[in-house]
Image: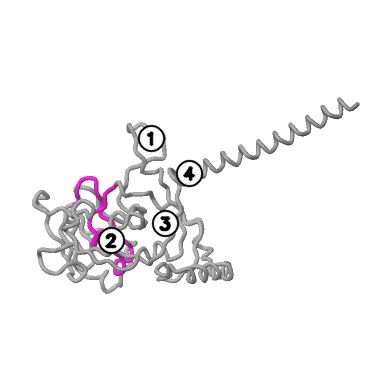
Amino acid sequence: MSKKKEIKEEKKDIKKKGTIRDYWETLCLVLIYVMFARTWIFQNSNIPSGSMKDTLLVGDRLIVNSFIYGPVLSNFEKKILPIKDIDYGDIVVFKYPARPEVPFIKRVIAKEGDVVYIKNQHVFLNGKELKEPYANLPDVIKNLNVEGIEISDKSQIKELPDYLKNPDAFEVETSPGRVDLRIKSSQGEMFPFSDTFGPYLIPEGHLFVMGDNRLNSEDSRYWGSLDEKMILGKAWVIWWSYEDGDYDYLKTDAKSRIQRLISKCVHFFDKTRWNRMFSCPS
């Protein structure tokens, strides 16, 4: 009887250990998948400023698709995988050239080989004015009749500099937590103090990006062309939207962080923008 009891107890122990091991292996696999997905497929991004109003609002939390612009060996892979080239109008998350550890989010306006010219906030691409329903501008500016310039020979147009490759082409101002850039101009006043920008040719492998809130966006007009290698992914879906303050992101001290956390707990239901959740920005 004692031997049978011992065998029974051993079986119970083995079963218990097997169950614990199964749970542990499952947990490890889930953690590995989450880490892989966060690195290579999806990332979380928070909108701290109003540079993309009204497409994206301060306090929008985004899921960023990091896989969509992945490298491929052949066009066949693009046909069977959810992979595409960066396109005009895409809203992309990228590393800010002056501070690569800081993610920025803007809209793609021009790609390599394009000529960009801006007059009174009206954007001209290769000599033709862009139709931009997403641009957040006062009606008095939108209704202006602005003439562009004729593009006859792109080889004669100056390339828009990249700060990482040509830092001498920029004026740099530093302050706590910020690095502000301005493209040096040989033609007088620099943007935004001049009402014109360009024309500039976008160099190979680079993009020209802008925020939708044109009067409150530091973008390629300030810090130049963006190397495509700096792209982290495409804005995919808003998973949560909360009414944060426009300049809360500048308050990085411990007290302010704790106050924001408490505010989110207290006002979760009345300050969450429920109508924006699970919508796709475009």
Q: Is residue 220 magenta?
A: yes
Q: Position of residue 218 (x, y in %)?
A: 29, 64
Residue ID for mark 1: 79
Dot 4: element: helix
On screen, residue 234 above or below 198: above
> What number of labels is visible?
4
Relative image position of residue 16 (x, y in whole percent): 74, 36
Q: Mark 4 = which residue?
A: 37
Label 2 with label 1: CB-CB less than 8 Å: no
Task: Identify which amino acid the numbered label 4 is placed on.
Answer: Ala
Question: In this rendering, which labeled residue sits more in front, label 2 or label 4?
Answer: 4
**In this view of the protein, which residue sits in the foreground, 146 or 162?**
162
Residue holding disc 3: 281
Name the amino acid type tagged 1.
Answer: Lys
Q: Are marks 3 and 1 in contact (CB under 8 Å)?
A: no
Amino acid bearing label 3:
Pro
In this picture, which residue range is highlighted in magenta?
202-228
Q: CA distance from mark 2 to mark 1?
A: 33 Å
Q: Secondary structure at mark 1?
A: helix
Q: Quadrant of the C terminus?
A: bottom left
Callout 2, which amino acid? Asp
Depth check: give the residue in front, 173 or 270.
173
